[in-house]
């Protein structure tokens, strides 16, 4: 391709920012980032915002390359045929290549009363709203956090450490990813903080009212504030734009993160479903996927073949307030091992990860292409899994 190439990135989270920065390796590429807000959100710190220990925002000047154009707006529709985007505030933006990095948010609640009376924490605005509600709520009031995954655990621990009376309703097991040792460590720390943990088949929420949470076992909890962390969804932009997605709405791509519908559209982060075998929604995957997406676009511009994704996870880190945590180590296929790190050491490591993630974005802004995925973090077996899935699909037809 000759002349200047325009690349637009939709979404200014971990994947989108890293991708945008990486694209500036070429002087003949013009990069535009479209994001609904003017600041970068440290999503992995939103539970701290709720607890009052961090504001969870970073100035884009600290993480985004100076040559990147930032448009503060929301994309309402992608016109793949016309290579243009319609903005919510009016007008259009044209592109030669598009990186779809819209991330994830709160899932549409299916439980009666959740939409009216519960408070999600998946976005900055949701967390800020909850923080304001808590500030107006007496410290002795009962708080219920629904969801036994990392977000629910971290939010419950943060609130309890600040002196709140907290019940964590898991709707199943506490920490589904964790092995027994890591789960016991989390339960022990929550107990030390005074959190009441309700798990098992009778701890599924069936309804939420302004002052109560009703459980499947027939028990009703008093709840002045109910925090909802049960499940995440993705924006429906791809669906509305006529692009093929998986059942959750993630953009279907091949192993180079290229849309199965359009070679000019590349996905990254939580809203990507490569080969209909998506990675776990996480910051851990978002950065590397952003790098892969940028490299795919740069390869296409250079006329070379993009490299297929080969990404592994190393585990899951969970904060348990500011003074403790659990790091659950994982196998290369993203299943937990029997090893975990706990206590203050885990808290320090989790904090280092949060800090270094932002530093990494800033480094890529200053030195595009500096982000590297080490050889040990690449997954050679993903191709085998995909081939096995395809064989199974053929034999079941």
Image: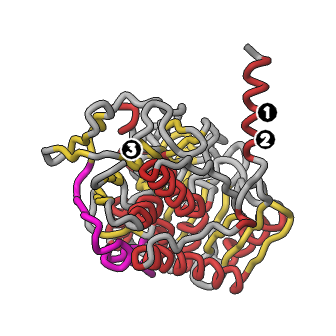
Q: CA distance from mark 1 to mark 3?
A: 41 Å
Residue at image point 61% right, 73% down: 319
Give the residue displayed 59% in from the left and 63% down from the top.
284
Q: Nearer the viewer, mark 3 or mark 2?
A: 2
Q: Is residue 67 magenta?
A: yes
Residues shaded magenta: 49-74
Rendered location of residue 377, percent (x, y)? 71, 64
The answer to whether the residues at label 1 and label 2 have Cβ atoms under 8 Å apart is yes
| CA separation in Å, label 1 and label 2 | 6 Å
Would you name the residue on which mark 2 appears?
A: 384
| Label annotation for residue 115 | 3
Q: Nearer the viewer, residue 103 or 312?
A: 312
Left or right of 73 in this view: 199: right
Q: Residue at x 71, y 72 (%)?
A: 327
Q: CA distance from mark 3 to mark 2?
A: 42 Å
Is residue 165 found inside the magenta-colored segment of the image? no
Mark 1 touching mark 3, by CB under 8 A?
A: no
């Amino acid at each position: 391709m000759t002349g200047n190439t325009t690349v637009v990135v939709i979404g200014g989270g971990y994947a989108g920012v890293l991708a945008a920065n990486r694209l500036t390796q070429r002087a003949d590429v013009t990069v535009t980032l479209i994001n609904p807000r003017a600041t970068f959100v440290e999503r992995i710190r939103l539970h701290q915002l709720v607890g009052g220990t961090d504001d969870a925002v970073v100035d884009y000047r600290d993480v985004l390359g100076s040559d990147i154009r930032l448009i503060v707006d929301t994309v309402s529709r992608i016109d793949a045929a016309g290579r243009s985007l319609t903005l919510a505030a009016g007008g259009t933006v044209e592109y030669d290549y598009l990186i779809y990095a819209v991330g994830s948010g709160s899932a549409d609640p299916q439980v009666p009363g959740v939409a009216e009376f519960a408070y999600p924490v998946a976005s900055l605005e949701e967390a800020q709203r909850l923080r304001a509600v808590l500030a107006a709520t007496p410290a002795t009031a009962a708080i219920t956090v629904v969801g036994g995954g990392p977000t629910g655990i971290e939010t419950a621990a943060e609130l309890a450490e600040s002196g709140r009376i907290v019940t964590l309703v898991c709707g199943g097991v506490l920490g589904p990813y964790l092995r027994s040792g890591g789960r016991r460590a989390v339960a022990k720390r929550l107990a030390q903080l005074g959190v009441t943990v309700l798990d098992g088949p009778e701890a599924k929420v069936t309804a939420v009212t302004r002052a109560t949470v009703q459980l499947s076992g027939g028990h009703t909890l008093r709840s002045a504030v109910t925090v909802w962390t049960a499940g995440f969804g993705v924006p429906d932009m791809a669906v509305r734009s006529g692009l093929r997605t998986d059942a959750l709405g993630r953009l279907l791509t091949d192993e180079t993160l290229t849309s199965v519908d359009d070679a000019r559209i590349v996905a990254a982060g939580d809203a990507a479903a490569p080969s209909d075998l998506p990675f776990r929604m996480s910051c851990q995957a978002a950065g590397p996927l952003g790098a892969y997406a940028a490299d795919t676009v740069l390869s296409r511009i250079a006329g070379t073949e993009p490299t297929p994704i080969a990404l592994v996870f190393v585990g899951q880190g969970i904060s348990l307030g500011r003074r403790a945590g659990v790091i659950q180590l994982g196998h290369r296929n993203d299943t937990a091992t029997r090893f975990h790190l706990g206590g203050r050491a885990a808290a320090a490591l989790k904090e280092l990860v949060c800090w270094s993630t932002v530093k990494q974005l800033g480094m890529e802004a200053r030195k595009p292409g500096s982000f590297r995925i080490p050889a040990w973090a690449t997954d050679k077996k993903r191709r085998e899994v995909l081939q096995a899935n395809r064989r199974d699909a053929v034999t079941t037809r």
